[in-house]
Amino acid sequence: MKKISEERLGELMVFGETVVYALFPIVVAYASKQMPPILFVAIATLIAGISSLLYLIFTKQISQFKNKKALKYISAVTVFIIIIPSLFIFTGGSLTSGINTSILLQSEIVFTLLIYAIIKYEKITFAKVLGAIQVIIGTSFIVYNGTSGVNIGDFLIIAGTMFYPIGNIFAKKALKETTIPVIICLRSLFGGAILLMISLFFETYSFGDFKSYVNDYYFYMLVSGLLIYGISKALWYGGLRRMEVSKAILISVGGYPALSLLFAIIFLNEFPTVYQWVGFGIICVGIFAILKSQNSKNPSGFGQ
């Protein structure tokens, strides 16, 4: 039997993460409209952290917490992947539709290309610029959606995605210093605790409300914590360890929106408008153009 290469294994892991992560916009859209959005993401993140901590205790890996260099990188991951994006995206999700959330999260690819070019993490090519412009045009269709008004929720989601590329650079560094469960555990515990404090200060609810939220929506919290913030992130970091950041992002961001649209129809009973379909199509063409250029010129990834 032919042995699978490390990079192909990484691609399969990222694809698996994509399938699970497709539930993320659906959970954001539903949960953020049922309860305080920051409270929800705080609890879900803490669930991921606690479950990872139990795993580390069981496998006797707690000693890896002493790696100061890894802690520095994980702290940055916590800020740029957990805290800041969650504040923007979950708040934005409470103000817009699940379909918009699904599609607009693809804005991450534009910010990835832009930020990585600025810091010289990759080269700018005409194909990448053209693809990025197509993504922006497609995003504009989604934001407009046939109305003359401005939905602040859409812009909050787009703003939240600009921090992911920075966080992924630090995640790549952290993966060289420690294990995947340690990264997920620490980023989730620290990030969840900070988000919970932010929720307590800025969101309005009583202790009785808190108990009601937990009783009514614990299933969604568990799904988010164990699957989306736990298993999917383990698959993501497994893939990230084996390939360049930008290639992993292209596979993930380019794949999950179609599944998310399907899930939005099934679980949220939301059906895309003409503008959403057009925007989605333009974005897909843009991402395909970038990916085709990527594979033809640098099969191993964007970074040199």
Image (cartoon, rainbow, N blue to C red):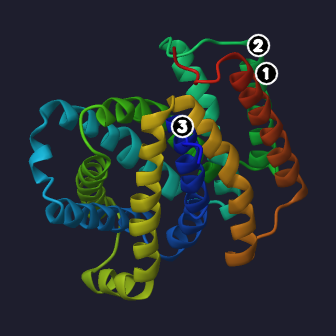
- Residue contact at pointers 2 and 1, CB within 8 angstroms: yes
Q: Please indicate whether residue 38 sits to the left or right of residue 98 in the image.
A: left
- Give the residue type that dot 3 points to: Ser
Q: Please indicate whether residue 130 sits to the left or right of residue 181 in the image.
A: right
Q: Which residue is mark 1?
A: 130
Question: In the rendering, which numbered label is found on residue 5?
Answer: 3
In this view, the residue in front, 245 or 202, is 245
Question: Is residue 94 something that shows in the picture?
Answer: no
Dot 1 falls on a residue whose secondary structure is: helix
Q: Look at discs 3 and 1 and give the one toward the viewer.
A: 3
Question: In the rendering, which numbered label is found on residue 126?
Answer: 2
Dot 2 falls on a residue whose secondary structure is: helix
In this view, the residue in front, 29 or 182, is 182
Question: Is residue 217 something that shows in the picture?
Answer: yes
Dot 3 falls on a residue whose secondary structure is: loop
C-alpha separation, residue under disc 2 versus residue under disc 3: 31 Å
Dot 3, how many residues are within 10 Å of its Cα: few (below 14), some (14-19), or many (20+)? few
**In the rendered image, which quarter is residue 294 located in?**
top right
Give how far across and how far down residue 284 sits, in percent.
79, 41
